[in-house]
Image (cartoon, grey):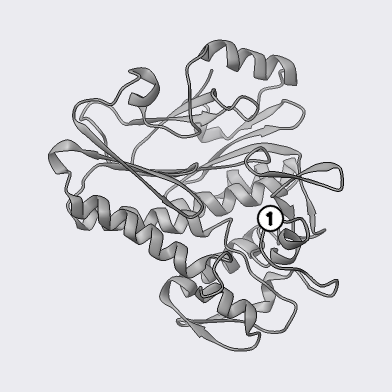
């Protein structure tokens, strides 16, 4: 664990990067060479409320691989968003007690209930009322609305909330699921190496070259055009959550989109949480969970999970690097 002061931690990172423009998760070529290597093809799209970036080997690139990956993300977005009244998730929210069928809906709900239990409620997808109260999600919340993931049920391919006053938002887990589905689509179209980055949730498939893995950068939480660390990954997912990503001013105070389900209030003690895992949905969900949990509990959760590592930056400028990342993560 590092214990530099907040000022020193962020100042050192900024100096190391100079004026080079960065984004929160990029392959090695984007900041090492400042231009794409000739053997990679890059495409961009929009889904899940963010820009999607896809990199494929030039020799393997096909429109089917790229289009299939993007379409899969857009499909998941359309089914599981709270920003579309016609989505399957909104059908669940609008019709308490009624079962709604859907493969993707059931997959993500089942995972959400697992991570809710694993994190002792810190990762709770029924946080929609709190998000509505602070203006991060459409709609209004009643004072009687409850946040409790155990009020959601999944049976086979069907999902429901048991009673009125419960509403789910999959913002802390569905993007990771979508990236995993996009990678499966790219692989089915013949891709052996690909990097898909959906606004900080990414999966690195294979290697861009035989002698090197993908190298990604973790965005500096206080400098939009800087990185705070780099990490090499291969057949792994990386997801970063942070209080800096979405903010609003509510009644004169700046608040984060990250809510503590146990209080219904925004949290701010973890400014950046990066999780490395075997799949992006796991990384996404755990990044959300440890952003809410206190230091000891969040660090313990990371260390207990097989195949999971983490890098956390706290509001006071201290940081935590899990044991398995000590020799992999390079602080800048």
Residue 226 position within the rendered picture, expressed as x and y whole percent measured from the top left: 54, 22
Residue 204 seen in render: no
Name the residue rendered at 33%, 25% in the picture. Answer: 29
| The quarter of the displayed image where residue 237 is located | top left
113 or 74: nearer the eye?
74
10 Å neighbourhood of mark 1: few (<14), some, or many (≥20)?
some
Give me the residue at 25% from left, 50% from top. 66
Quarter holding the N terminus is top right
Mark 1: secondary structure: loop
Horizontally, residue 117 falls left or right of residue 89, namely: right
Q: Which residue is mark 1?
A: 136
**Relative height, residue 207 to residue 69 (above, below):** above
In the image: residue 169, left or right of residue 234:
right
Q: Position of residue 6 (x, y in %)?
A: 74, 21
Q: Residue 42 in the image: x percent, y percent?
A: 28, 37
Q: Who's the residue at 54% across and 12% down the image?
A: 16
Q: Position of residue 269 (x, y in %)?
A: 76, 39
* Corner quadrant of residue 273: top right
Confirm whether residue 175 shows in the render: yes
Residue 279 higher or lower than 217, as above or below: below
Quarter of the image for residue 114 reads bottom right
Tell me: residue 77, above or below residue 219: below
């Amino acid at each position: 664990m590092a214990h530099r002061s907040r000022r020193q931690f962020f100042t050192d990172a900024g100096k190391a990067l100079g004026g080079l423009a960065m984004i929160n998760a990029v392959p090695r070529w984007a900041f090492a060479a400042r231009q794409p290597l000739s053997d990679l093809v890059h495409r961009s799209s929009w889904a899940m409320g963010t820009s999607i970036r896809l990199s494929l080997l030039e020799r393997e690139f096909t429109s089917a691989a790229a289009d299939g990956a993007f379409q899969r993300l857009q499909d998941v977005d359309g089914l599981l968003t709270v920003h579309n009244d016609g989505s399957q998730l909104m059908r669940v929210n609008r019709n308490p007690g009624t079962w709604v069928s859907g493969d993707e809906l059931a997959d993500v709900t089942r995972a959400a209930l697992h991570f809710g239990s694993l994190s002792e409620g810190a990762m709770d997808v029924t946080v929609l009322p709190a998000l509505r109260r602070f203006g991060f999600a459409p709609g209004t919340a009643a004072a009687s609305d409850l946040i409790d993931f155990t009020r959601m049920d999944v049976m086979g391919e069907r999902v429901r909330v048991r009673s009125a006053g419960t509403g789910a938002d999959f913002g802390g887990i569905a993007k990771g699921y979508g990236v995993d589905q996009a990678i499966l689509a790219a692989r089915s179209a013949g891709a052996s190496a690909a990097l898909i980055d959906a606004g900080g949730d990414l999966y690195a498939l294979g290697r861009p070259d035989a002698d090197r893995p993908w190298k990604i950068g973790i965005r500096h939480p206080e400098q939009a055009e800087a990185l705070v660390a780099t990490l090499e990954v291969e057949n792994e997912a990386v997801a970063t959550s942070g209080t800096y990503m979405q903010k609003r001013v509510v009644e004169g105070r700046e608040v984060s989109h990250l809510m503590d389900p146990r209080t219904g209030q925004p949290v701010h003690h973890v400014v950046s949480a990066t999780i490395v895992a075997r799949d992006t949905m796991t990384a996404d969900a755990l990044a959300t969970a440890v952003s809410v949990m206190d230091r000891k509990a969040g660090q313990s959760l990371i260390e207990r999970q097989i195949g999971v590592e983490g890098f956390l930056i706290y509001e006071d400028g201290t940081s935590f690097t899990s044991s398995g990342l000590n020799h992999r993560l390079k602080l800048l």
